Image (cartoon, rainbow, N blue to C red):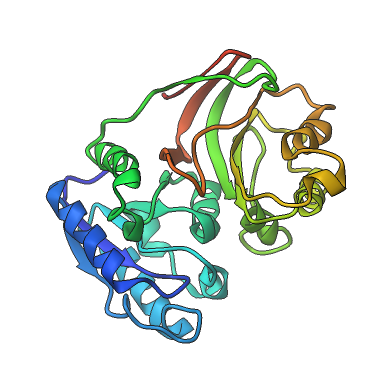
Amino acid sequence: MKESSLIHIIAPAGAVNKKNVKGGIKFLSSLGFSCIPGSALFNSDGYLAGTDADRLNDIQTALNDSGVLAVWAARGGYGTTRIIDQIKWNKFFKKPSWLIGFSDITALHIHLSNNNIPSIHGPMVGQAVDEACQESVRLVGSILKNDFPEYKLTGHAMNRPGKATGPITGGNLTLICATLGTATEIITDNKILFIEDINEPAYKIDRMMVQLKRAGKLSRLKGLIVGHMTEVTDEKQFGKTVFEIITEHTKDFSFPVCFQFPAGHEMPNMPLILGMKSELTVEKKRINLCYL
């Protein structure tokens, strides 16, 4: 990517905690980055970080700035899909920066992955004030300096072994399903799909996996990475765990499946580079992920 230390900080979704975001910016500065806060970064409009027009203006300004290294979201929540269809991508696609964030930012990651532009699924700026998150933030900083991680992790008994090569796409499962039938519908053919979610009952996870399968989004996958499934409720009433649900809906396919990858709504939230050719090796006792 670019030789720059400038990072735009934006809030395209929920209103931010001003103290946390300022602390996060201070931590990023300690890593050698210069942060440019969006003009509406600390705005609020009910739940949202300012009006749709406020948030759209900030993200458009950031994406249009060809001289910056990255555009980093301050937080997620909800609201990005309200403005995604109004974003003009022409300038950004000609000279892209890194886009960083997770959760609601999945909507943007998917659009970039669909257009073969790498981005970083990783922690928010507002989380960088938390010591428990800072190692993940440092890893993002390393990626920004072209030092890409190789993950060698402990496996899981429910893993389906195999090797997959291809770009990673996805993010939050709810946001993935929200793209279906839209202008930014996720493209999964010949890709490794990453999913994570928070505070969803088991039956909704089941419903979303059924939806992906019915939409043909699992039929040509190279591999599946399952990240944190946080605060899932209703597993006992539903009669299956989340991992059992995912196993059931992928049993007719041959791609490798990796469970419990440390990314999502818990710590550690290890950064994943989406849209870049990757190699995933899955075994029962170990997982290896590297970028090619």
Is residue 237 rendered to the left or right of residue 41?
right
| 5 up-or-down from 10: above or below | above
- Image quadrant of residue 269? top left
Count up the numbered dots. Answer: 0
Q: Position of residue 291 (x, y in %)?
A: 41, 26
Give the position of the C terminus as an image quadrant. top left
Quadrant in the picture for residue 244: top right
Any part of residue 251 in sight: yes
Residue 84, image x, y percentages = 52, 69
Q: Is residue 286 above or below residue 41?
A: above
Foreground pick, 197 / 224: 197
Q: Residue at x 44, y 38 (%)?
A: 272
Is 64 drawn above or below residue 3 in the view shown?
below
Q: Position of residue 109 (x, y in %)?
A: 49, 52
Q: Position of residue 27 (x, y in %)?
A: 19, 53
The furthest residue to the front: 236
Q: Is residue 87 left or right of residue 178?
A: left
Task: Depth check: give the residue in front, 169 or 115.
Answer: 169
> On the picture, is 120 further left or further right than 189?
left
| Image quadrant in which the N terminus is located | top left
- Answer with the quarter of the image where residue 18 lies: bottom left
**Left or right of 159: which side holds 289?**
left
Residue at 27%, 79% (x, y): give it: 39
Asked if one can make out residue 66 in the rendered structure from this viewpoint, the answer is: no
Q: Residue at point 53% right, 72% down?
A: 79
User: Which of 266/263 is in front?
Assistant: 266
